[in-house]
Image (cartoon, rainbow, N blue to C red):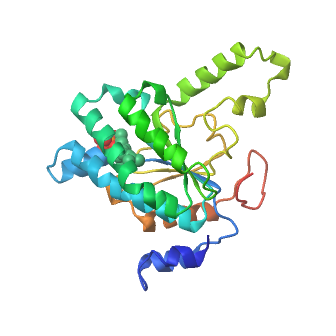
Amino acid sequence: MSLQDILSVVEAGSEEEALARQVNFERLPVHVAVIMDGNGRWAAQRHLPRVEGHRAGIESVREVVEGSARLGIGVLTLYAFSVENWKRPAAEVSTLMLLLKRYLRLELNTLLRNNIRFRVIGRADELSPEIRRELSVAEEKTSSNSGMLFNIALNYGGRAEIVEAVRRLISDGVRPENLDEQRFGDYLYTAGQPDPDLLIRTSGEMRVSNFLLWQIAYAEIWVTDTLWPDFRKRDLLEAILAYQKRNRRYGGINQPAVAGR
Ligand code: FPP
């Protein structure tokens, strides 16, 4: 993927085009993770029910998935539903699941066309059989794609993921002397994937909200006041440009900014 790929999906002469031309394609973040926040506030500002914010947020999902794939991002992880989100009103939860189902049905061809591999991270086994079926179809149909990996975090909790990893390590009989950070990472949902280089959070909140707690150890965090339903390719490009200006030190000193580790 390249400048030409992203230019083919942005308007000529637009602010997005100008931003895309500033991107250094040699130093893209390999893994971008996103906490999509602010759907409820977006709806409230328009005197609409909260679910309308989620509905509008789907267009942002489409833009970011396509934009990331065309830029050449290796892995994109979107936080769609946390283990805590079950506390929301039942009608909101069921609308979120319905939107997810609809998204998968409508966007599967786009994922295939863009060579995107789709994966679920989280406790998928606690989702309804119907949703699990839709997710499996999308995972299977995109499994041989070799382009961007699109993780969707569903019924996901960072602490739960770590506890689950420890349980499996114990049940596999891994001895303490054989355990190191690399091995531990192999027991997480993201086994084999690079850690996020860039964590984006929308709607101005300065929290990590139990998202990829282990994996974001060295991620650069970029927070925007933009509410998720207003997030567009322009915002993604701004985040990437901000990332490329950062000097990543990993606890050391004065290393030049690098993509990945
Ligand atoms: C946070 O906004 C957003 C969510 C809990 C869900 C995000 C889900 C979607 C965008 C739709 C489904 C996703 C996919 C990938 C098809 P909030 O409700 O917490 O907003 P608030 O903080 O303003 O109340």
Nearest the viewer among 205 and 78 is 78
Residue 154 in percent (x, y) is at 45, 36
Q: In this view, does 245 lie to the left or right of 51?
A: right
Residue 120 in percent (x, y) is at 51, 39
The residue under the point 58% across, 34% down is 213
The residue under the point 49% across, 28% down is 123
Q: Is residue 53 left or right of residue 58?
A: left
Against 74, is 20 above or below? below
Nearest the viewer among 253 and 135 is 135
Residue 48 in percent (x, y) is at 16, 48
Q: Is residue 56 left or right of residue 77?
A: left
Which of the four quarters of the rendered structure image does ligand 1 lie in?
A: top left
Q: In this view, does 128 lie to the left or right of 167?
A: left
Against 68, is 250 above or below? above
Tell me how many marks there are: 0
The image quadrant of residue 231 is: bottom left
Q: Would residue 82 be visible to someone looking at this image?
A: yes
Against 57, is 86 above or below? above
